[in-house]
Amino acid sequence: MFAGFALFFLAMSGQQAHEVRVLFANDAWYLENPDPERAFIGEVRGTPLLRYRDLRPRHFYLVTADGSWDIFTAGHDKVIKEFEGARVRIVGKTLQRELEGIERRELWPGTLQILNDR
């Protein structure tokens, strides 16, 4: 019943309902992290390969109304690439830290869903 209501709400709001893709939501390391999940709505954008001193590449980021978040991909680069340029809803956990004086905001995506077509 809830799913039917959600589809009705999306149809009325002008947004198309798309399949929810599970990225890290079922992984033990994700589930064991005590931080709460949050929902983010924004546009996935790609960037040239960037490396920080911790040597983790940053290929994609999410632009939201209140700024941008690096998207942690860990082997899901091809999946995230499918969503590049799309308005999406990501439910995930966040990590905010300072690295060499630069504030980094990282989003660990549990699930990802396109809200509209490109």
Image: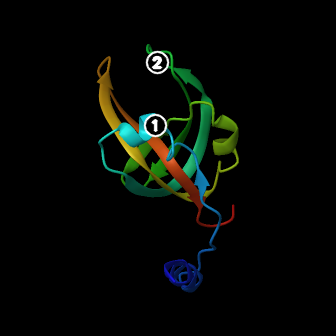
Checking the image for residue 28, the label placed there is 1
Q: Nearer the viewer, residue 65 or 70?
A: 70
Which residue is painted at 43% across and 39% down in the image? 30
Callout 2: SS: loop
Which residue is painted at 29% across and 41% down in the image? 34
Relative to 11, say whether 35 is above or below. above
Task: Check disc 2 and give the amino acid type.
Answer: Tyr
Asked where in the image residue 105 lies, by quadrant, the reply is top left
Task: Check disc 1 and give the amino acid type.
Answer: Ala
Discs 2, 1 touching: Cβ within 8 Å? no
What is the x, y in percent for residue 83? 65, 51
| 21 horizontally vs 5: left or right | right
> Which numbered disc, 2 or 1, marks the residue that appears first in the sequence?
1
What is the x, y in percent for residue 14? 59, 80
Q: Nearer the viewer, residue 76 or 81?
A: 76
Give the residue number, with chain letter if any, for mark 2: 52
